[in-house]
């Protein structure tokens, strides 16, 4: 009888609340905080002497939101919705076929001192080759190179840079994973991402994960983006990202890309700018360290 009573008691325990009592990562949801981050990005002082820009490389599976993140960063910086990187709402083959670098406009005729580079999505059998991504990390691939899923870039290709400088190299690697499909991404694709991460590690390049599409996995966040850091579901997804890729949780930034909106949203901007600020700081720290060691 006691056994059945204990079983009933265990089954009747209330399930954990979908929310934490306090945010597990503090955020200041204010227009002033957004202005402060924009000011910090505008005043970025490059550690690389004579350099004009820091280079950030995005990679990840098809449909993860890499191009959309680039557009969202530019939208947050510009204060208006931007589509500088062509993105596809449909799922399937990668919409990006070339190695593209995107400058972020600060004012007419002037740009922020960093660029975001986009590549073809990773797939199990096709997609961008890990050898090409590694060549990009090393600075060997020029802008506008068209990827060949069958073979990596040849050293005789006109888009191959045989003598890259520090400015040509990647200064921060950003892995993009969709929160709603983290569990569904094949082990093969995850392994390819790990191969790229390991090479970036060997080169000393800092790494960040953007976890996109958070509104699709948590109704609380879909209802109000401010719930993102009190959501138990979002934290579970960040832990899953960390376990699958091996990236520390404090280098994983959950956010929502602009997709349906036609005007800027303060909460969306703040999350995007928080991630961007950290990415640029990490990139600048890397360049400073490389300059010092050289």
Image (cartoon, rainbow, N blue to C red):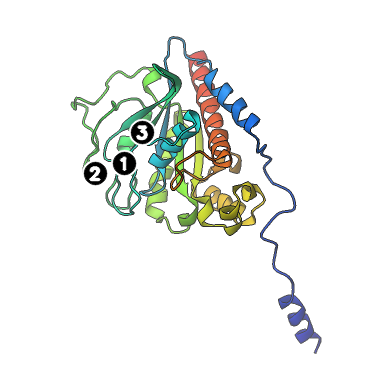
Q: CA distance from mark 2 to mark 1?
A: 9 Å
Q: Where does label 3 land, which residue?
A: 84
Query: Is mark 2 in CB contact (under 8 Å) with mark 3?
Result: no
Q: Provide the residue designation for mark 1.
A: 120
- Nearer to us of marks 1 and 3 is 3
The residue under label 2 is 149
Q: Classify 10 Å Cα crowding around label 3: few (below 14), some (14-19), many (20 and above).
A: some
Who comes first in sequence, dot 1 or dot 3? Answer: 3
Q: In the displayed structure, does residue 5 sit left or right of residue 154?
A: right
The residue located at (66%, 39%) in the rendering is 27
Quarter of the image with the N terminus is bottom right
Residue 205 visible in the displayed image: no
What's the residue at 46%, 10% (across, down)?
A: 49
Under circle 3, the secondary element is loop
Q: Is residue 15 left or right of residue 213?
A: right
Instruction: Give the total of numbered labels.
Output: 3
Q: Are marks 2 and 1 in contact (CB under 8 Å)?
A: yes
Q: Examine the image and state in which quarter residue 282 appears.
A: top right
SS for dot 2: loop
* Most foreground residue, 122 or 91: 91
């Amino acid at each position: 009888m006691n056994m059945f009573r204990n079983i009933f008691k265990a089954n009747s325990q209330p399930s954990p609340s979908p929310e934490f009592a306090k945010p597990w990562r503090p955020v200041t949801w204010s227009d002033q905080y957004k202005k402060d981050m924009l000011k910090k990005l505008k005043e970025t002082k490059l550690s690389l002497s004579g350099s004009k820009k820091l280079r950030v490389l995005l990679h990840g599976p098809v449909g993860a939101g890499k191009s959309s993140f680039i557009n969202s960063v530019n939208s947050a910086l510009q204060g208006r919705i931007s589509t500088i990187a062509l993105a596809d709402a449909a799922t399937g083959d990668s919409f990006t076929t070339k190695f593209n670098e995107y400058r972020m406009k600060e004012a007419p005729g002037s740009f922020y001192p960093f660029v975001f580079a986009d590549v073809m999505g990773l797939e199990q059998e096709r997609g961008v080759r890990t050898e090409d991504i590694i060549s990009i990390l090393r600075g060997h691939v020029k802008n506008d190179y068209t990827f060949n899923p069958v073979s990596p870039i040849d050293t005789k290709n006109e888009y191959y840079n045989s003598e890259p400088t520090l400015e040509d190299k990647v200064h921060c690697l950003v892995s993009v994973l969709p929160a709603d499909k983290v569990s569904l991404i094949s082990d093969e694709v995850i392994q390819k991402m790990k191969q790229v991460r390991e090479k970036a590690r060997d080169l000393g390049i800092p790494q960040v994960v953007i976890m996109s599409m958070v509104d699709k996995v948590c109704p609380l966040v879909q209802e109000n983006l401010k719930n993102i850091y009190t959501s138990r579901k979002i934290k579970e997804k960040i832990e899953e990202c960390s376990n699958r890729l091996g990236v520390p949780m404090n280098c994983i930034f959950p956010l929502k890309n602009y997709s349906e909106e036609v005007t800027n949203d303060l909460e969306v901007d703040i999350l995007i700018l928080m991630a961007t600020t950290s990415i640029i700081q990490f990139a600048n720290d890397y360049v400073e360290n490389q300059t010092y060691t050289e």
